[in-house]
Amino acid sequence: MEDILITIQQWIPVNVLVGLTVASIIGFVGSLIAIPWILIRLPGDYFDMRVPRHWMKDHHPVLRIIGLIVKNCLGAVFLAAGFLMLFLPGQGLLTMLIGISFMDFPNKRRLEARIVGQPAILNAINRMRHKFNKSPLIVVGNA
């Protein structure tokens, strides 16, 4: 094991390894707080494709565009962090789901409904929502 550590230290400085470890711990703790916080605040029909979603529809067009850019950038960060959490400590799939939910792209809602519609994921989310007295999510994949 020490040989592996020495080889890694030859290629990556110790301060970088310490920084990655700290970032991993912060990301893990942050995901344990942020993911449930986001999932319990979603409306019960958020994944129902029959219900239209209009984000910031009553705001000035410039504010809407700035908001969409910020929201998509935040979604990309969550998506990348979720991907990393597949290999590091954290809730990778749920973090990726949050990232996808923030982003805007064609057929996003169908992809979201397909992901959340998986029984294991939907049951985990609904158990979490039940603990906070929130209604279960309704998932309808086709508009």
Image: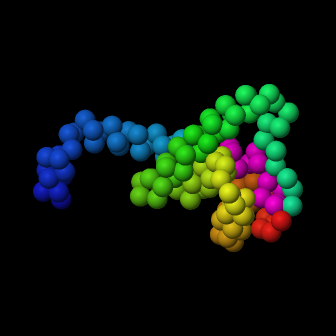
User: Residue 48 location in percent, x, y?
Assistant: 82, 60
Q: Residue at x 25, y 35 (%)?
A: 15
Residue 31 colored magenta? no
**Residue placed farthest to the bottom in the image?**
119
Q: Residue at x 44, y 53 (%)?
A: 84
Instruction: Evaluate whether residue 47 shows in this view.
Output: yes
Q: Is residue 79 left or right of residue 141?
A: left
- In this rendering, the count of numbered labels is 0
Q: Residue at x 20, y 39 (%)?
A: 13
In front of the other: 43 or 80: 80
User: Residue 87 location in percent, x, y?
Assistant: 41, 58
Q: In which quadrant of the rendered image does the N terminus lie?
A: bottom left
Q: In which quadrant of the rendered image does the C terminus lie?
A: bottom right
The picture quadrant where one finds residue 129 is: bottom right
Query: Is 44 above or below relative to 59?
Result: below
Query: Is 104 above or below relative to 117?
Result: above
The picture quadrant where one finds residue 130 is: bottom right
The residue range painted magenta reads 32-49
